[in-house]
Image: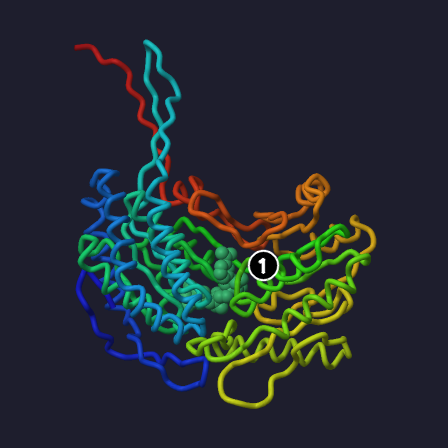
Amino acid sequence: MTIDGLPIAGTSWIDVTNPADGTLLAQAPDCSSEQLEAAVSAARSAFPSWAATAYEERQKVLHEMADAIEAHVEPLRQVLAREAGKTLDDARGEILGLAYWLRGISKLRLPETVNEDSAARRSVTRHVPLGVVGAIVPWNYPLGQIGFKLAPALLAGNTVVLKPSPFTPLATLRLGELLRSVVPPGAVNVVSGGDSLGPWMTAHPGIDKISFTGSTATGRKVMAGAAGSLKRVTLELGGNDPAIVLADIDVPTVAEKLFWGAFGHNGQVCLAAKRVYIHSDVYEPLKRALADYAATVRTGNGVTEDVRLGPLQNRPQYERILDLIRDCEDHDYSFLTGGLPEDGTGYFVRPTIIDNPPEHARIVQEEQFGPVLPLLKFDDIEDAITRANAGDYGLGASVWSADTDAALAVARRLEAGTVWINEIQHLTPQVTFGGLKDSGIGSENGIEGLLAFTAPQTITVTPGRS
Ligand code: NAD
């Protein structure tokens, strides 16, 4: 681990499994409560001087962090691909994406608002850092998610204790090593551990804010854990994103984009299309095109050539997906592709497309977070919008049509934090993203994402008598 700029070994260890064959890949430190104390205390000690550092200097450090990452893409991607079940290309993209995010976020400026500037008084509101941020990330984009948290937290003047998922700690621990020579000691601490570590962080009185990405169920626990010490929280949670396909699309183009929008990284993406509502006029050709495209995509060990989709990342997720597929089988829903895997090593599931199951099916109602996609037919757009908005999630959505005005009219009525038209999952450091309803509280990226790591402070000056 990295605590106060130093390498710290574990006193006990957690196993990290290679999802491509189920073997032990490595062991990672299981941070003890004393070691977490040391990390929080290092972050607290580093905070005053980091917060006092000029904004331009902090921007420069973000660039230096990006440089260090770019100089180590190859070793990082070998670790990331193996622990996360990614292809080497996807792992490279994620690492370069982290560097891109650090540079992109560094360009954001914290606003200052002049509230009053009169003979009687000058009142200005600025934004000050919160202190120590606890950043907790999931296993699907172990490094990518860090850019959404570490970059704005540091830029705003906070120090950080970062915790990866116990399923994917290795590339993040390596990142901690790389950053030791770039950031001041204590500004970025990286700890790994088992199921106790997250709750210790959320309850820790020395941490001022938790920036959390993960499931809605865990998000509730994080909020409850943070309540005791009145921590601020940002929660980026689960989703069950609808895609709505109107009748006027170009089928081959949309089929390919939708396939990757649903099955990229095996659907283990918070913003993946998780249910696709298709106008009945194009239902048959689009379903065929999706099934044909799926047949061209090779699933296998991500570090092997030509493989486009690796294994599911971990055994609980694999079991959950098998359970959902079995449920589809038990209810005699029609399978266009995929299905239960044959026995073998590794957590592999081929892209599985379910043909128009009923709306109440579990595969429609639940967040699958895996490579099983229901296609659903509609005739009336009002019906599609109602079905898309039903449920507790409100993360992302997409609308597909050659008629931008018609698509916009639908998009405006969808209950989602981000709605894309004719694309999906496009995020940038400058654009705010967050969930409605049970998909989250607060947002990341863009100016709102930066402000989330600050508190407003108003200073009022009334001319004094000399
Ligand atoms: P998870 O909630 O199980 O775990 C996320 C992180 O929280 C891990 O680091 C875990 O160790 C930690 N954690 C577990 N219990 C905790 C507790 N009680 N207190 C504090 N921390 C705790 O989620 P996951 O399975 O790793 O990720 C999949 C979920 O994440 C999906 O629901 C997905 O939609 C969601 N997700 C959301 C976004 C988003 O931006 N909205 C992005 C990616 C993933």
- According to the picture, the residue beneath numbered tag 1 turns out to be 239
Foreground pick, 442 / 245: 245
Position of 366 compared to 280: left or right? left
Query: Which residue is rendered at x = 59% and y = 52% of the image?
Result: 423
Foreground pick, 237 / 466: 237
Residue 24, by quadrant, is bottom left
In the image, residue 326 lies at what x, y percent? 67, 81
In the image, residue 8 lies at what x, y percent? 20, 70
In the image, residue 180 lies at what x, y percent? 20, 60
Foreground pick, 100 / 26: 100
The residue carrying pointer 1 sits among few (fewer than 14), some (14 to 19) or many (20 or more) residues within 10 Å by Cα, namely: many
In the image, residue 25 lies at what x, y percent? 35, 82
The amino acid pointed to by label 1 is Gly
Query: Which residue is rendered at x = 51% and y = 75% of the image?
Result: 312
Q: Assess mark 1: CB under 8 A from ligand 1?
A: yes
429 shown above or below 30: above
Residue 199, by quadrant, is bottom left
Asked if residue 397 can be seen in this view, the reply is: yes
Quadrant that contains the C terminus: top left
